[in-house]
């Protein structure tokens, strides 16, 4: 295996694009460079329009009729990339150029394109887990050695003493929420869960305490995932609907839904957060980040505390800034929040007689991960007894991915999706109404809640 390097189009700092080439590929450097610069020209033709301030997004309905044509163009480009994935460099580069042009044409022709129903993602660009397993199976962008965000969140919740002050409980819960929020490490897209797909697991800590967790795909159109976890002192509940949109030269992924931390022993004291948005950026390089300056709220009505956070780019895309307000203090700021989600996040009190407090330290968890002894702190056991278990549903696809048999992986993925369509049509013909196994829809709030526990409000 050898490498070819090309200057990235329009790059003032002369960055290089590195392309891996099979040593026995029937392709010359001139062939590859000609095709690469054809792709560069496609970028340059629209880069000025796409790299400027992006237009405001429209509602999904605004573009619905035109999205079919856009999807068709993107799908054709994806299919070509799939076909050429095992060809020589020149063929792969031509297919990539076609995909680039399709994306840029779509981005330049419209303000915003809803990608929720787009199914043309090449199998090589898919992750080895479905959306239901992001919290447990995805690799952190901070480091491959960083424990998953679900471990970090539960560990932070475990540390909160339910008999501590309201202020201490709020800051502890806020730290747990920050521990769980991060963009994806990879640009690979998780597989879309089928209706009724589940992911269940138990996370046990060194002292014997544990969290019992269940996730379920409760809706397919639109795609909604509900989750519930019960721990020694906290209950975690929520549901999420990803809303990806192509906006200019990036994909904006808003997460519509809610997340709650509840302390049952304190009369269901509830901490509720809005969900942050992240972006997949294409220019000047491909990467993911939290959406800058998009407000995120975290509040507890019973204690009267409310936090407002933003992720910023002025000092790096890992930066978190915000403030904690106390309703009892006339809505005044009682703490300022500053730090990085890949480092320390500190709450600094506005009163001079109080000391700053570190509410989250990513380095602490990174040291645990790098030690190779995470099993001494916590362990996770997945449950596969449900026939709709995520790992069971996608087993053949995952096994094919593991052995790099992409034709088999693609076929296995298509079989799962086709089987789901057959089931859906059969239910419609019988007049059956499908209901989730573990969750129920609460009409008064529009939320999905665990169906065997009292509503937590």
Image (cartoon, rainbow, N blue to C red):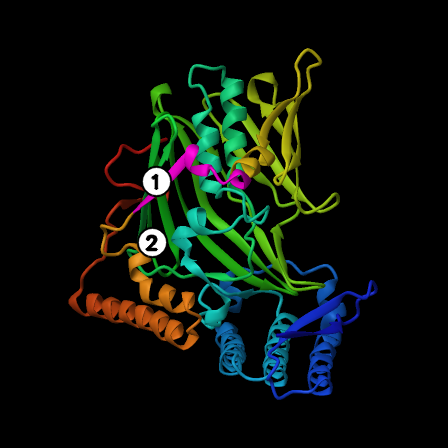
Q: Nearer the viewer, residue 337 or 185?
A: 185
- Which residue is denoted by mark 2 in the rendering? 217
Query: What residue do we see at 46% from left, 38% from top?
Result: 374
Which of the 4 quarters of the picture holds residue 267?
A: top left
Say left or right for 206 vs 81: left
Q: Quadrant of the C terminus?
A: top left
Q: Which residues are magenta?
A: 369-382
Please name the residue that numbered disc 1 is placed on. Answer: 228
Between the residue at mark 2 and the residue at mark 1, the CA separation in whole angstroms equals 12 Å
Q: Is residue 231 left or right of residue 54?
A: left
Q: Earlier in the sequence, mark 2 or mark 1?
A: 2
In the image, residue 376 lies in the stretch drawn in magenta: yes
Q: Would residue 178 be seen by someone viewing this image from the given angle?
A: no
Residue 260 seen in the current view? yes
| Quadrant of the snapshot with the N terminus | bottom right
User: Dot 1: what SS?
Assistant: strand
18 within the magenta span: no
């Amino acid at each position: 295996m050898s490498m070819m390097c090309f200057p990235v189009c329009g790059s003032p700092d002369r960055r290089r694009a590195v392309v891996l080439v099979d040593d026995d590929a029937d392709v010359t450097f001139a062939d590859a460079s000609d095709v690469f610069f054809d792709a560069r020209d496609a970028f340059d033709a629209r880069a000025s329009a796409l790299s400027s301030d992006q237009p405001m997004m429209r509602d999904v309905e605004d573009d619905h009729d035109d999205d079919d044509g856009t999807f068709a163009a993107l799908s054709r480009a994806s299919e070509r990339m799939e076909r050429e994935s095992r060809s020589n460099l020149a063929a792969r580069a031509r297919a990539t150029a076609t995909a680039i042009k399709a994306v840029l044409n779509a981005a330049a022709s419209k303000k915003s394109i809803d990608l929720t129903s787009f199914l043309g993602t090449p199998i090589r660009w898919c992750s080895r887990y479905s959306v239901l397993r992001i919290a447990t199976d995805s690799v952190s962008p901070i480091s491959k050695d960083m424990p998953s965000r679900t471990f970090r969140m539960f560990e932070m919740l475990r540390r909160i003493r339910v008999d501590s002050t309201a202020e201490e409980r709020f800051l502890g819960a806020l730290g747990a929420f920050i521990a769980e929020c991060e963009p994806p490490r990879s640009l690979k897209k998780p597989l879309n869960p089928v209706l009724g797909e589940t992911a269940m697991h138990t996370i046990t800590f060194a002292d014997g305490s544990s969290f019992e967790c269940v996730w379920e795909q409760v809706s397919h159109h639109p795609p909604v995932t509900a989750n519930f976890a019960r721990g020694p002192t906290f209950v975690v509940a929520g549901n999420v609907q990803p809303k990806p949109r192509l906006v200019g030269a990036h994909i904006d992924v808003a997460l519509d839904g809610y997340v709650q931390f509840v302390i049952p022993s304190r009369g269901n004291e509830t901490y509720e957060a809005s969900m942050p948005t992240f972006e997949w950026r294409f220019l000047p390089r491909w990467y993911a980040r939290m959406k800058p300056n998009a407000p995120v709220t975290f509040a507890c009505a019973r204690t009267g505390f409310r936090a407002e956070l933003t992720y910023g780019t002025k000092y790096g895309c890992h930066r978190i800034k915000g403030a904690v307000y106390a309703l009892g203090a006339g809505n005044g700021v009682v703490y300022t929040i500053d730090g990085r989600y890949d480092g320390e996040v500190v709450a600094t009190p506005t009163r001079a007689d109080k000391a700053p407090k570190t509410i989250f330290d990513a380095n602490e968890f990174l040291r645990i991960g790098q030690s190779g002894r995470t099993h001494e702190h916590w362990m996770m056991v997945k449950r596969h007894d449900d026939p709709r278990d995520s790992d069971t549903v996608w087993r053949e696809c995952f096994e094919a991915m593991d052995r790099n048999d992409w034709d088999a992986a693609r076929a296995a993925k298509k079989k799962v999706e086709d089987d789901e369509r057959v089931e859906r049509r059969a239910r419609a013909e019988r007049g059956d109404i499908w209901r989730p196994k573990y969750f129920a829809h609460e009409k008064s709030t529009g939320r999905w809640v665990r169906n065997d526990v009292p509503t937590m409000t």
